[in-house]
Image (cartoon, rainbow, N blue to C red):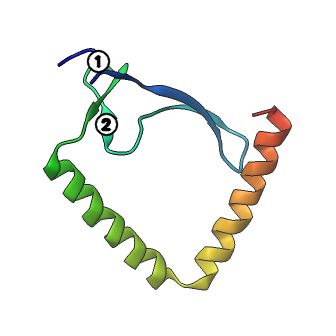
Amino acid sequence: MSSEELIEAKRVIRVNSKGVKTRKVKCRKGYRLGSSGVSCVPATGSERSKKRRSIKKAIRTKRAAGASLKRRTTKKRLKAIKRRKSYGL
């Protein structure tokens, strides 16, 4: 691998609706975290196809859950946004 292919992973601090902070490592689209845990490497074709299938399945599951799930997640998301704002993130 050349030095251009190794992309630094970005560390993100997440805060949930309860106010619990968690540190996550994010890679850009089409990349996954490498075995070192520091750099992002390109995802293989099979990984990308599995990801696409899992996203479609998640959409079907959420749609089946109905409008109540949408309301609940909206409330929690807004609460988490308020928490992040209060933490200055």
Q: Which residue is situated farthest in the top direction here?
A: 3
Q: Residues within 10 Å of mark 2 (few under 14, many from 20)?
A: many
- Compared across the picture, whether 86 is left or right of 70 comes to right
Quadrant location of the C terminus?
Answer: top right
Horizontal and vertical percent for residue 65? 50, 81
Q: How many marks?
A: 2
**Mark 1 is on which residue type?**
Ser
- Compared across the picture, whether 18 is left or right of 35 comes to right
Closest to the observer, 43 or 83:
43
Q: Image point 32% across, 71% down: which residue? A: 57
Closest to the observer, 44 or 25:
44
**Mark 2 is on which residue type?**
Arg
Mark 2: secondary structure: strand
The label on residue 75 is none
Q: Answer with the quarter of the image where residue 6 lies.
A: top left
Horizontal and vertical percent for residue 37? 34, 22
Residue with the mark numbered 1: 36
Horizontal and vertical percent for residue 62? 47, 75
Residue with the mark numbered 2: 32
3D distance between C-alphas at marks 1 and 2:
11 Å
Q: Image point 38% across, 78% down: which residue? A: 60
Please identify, in this view, whether the residue under mark 1 or under mark 2 is nearer the observer. Answer: 2
Q: Are marks 1 and 2 in contact (CB under 8 Å)?
A: no
- Compared across the picture, whether 39 is left or right of 12 comes to left
Q: Image point 77% across, 55% down: which residue? A: 79
User: Against 19, is 25 above or below?
Assistant: above
Q: Image point 66% across, 46% down: which residue? A: 16
Horizontal and vertical percent for residue 2? 21, 16
User: Against 28, is 66 above or below?
Assistant: below
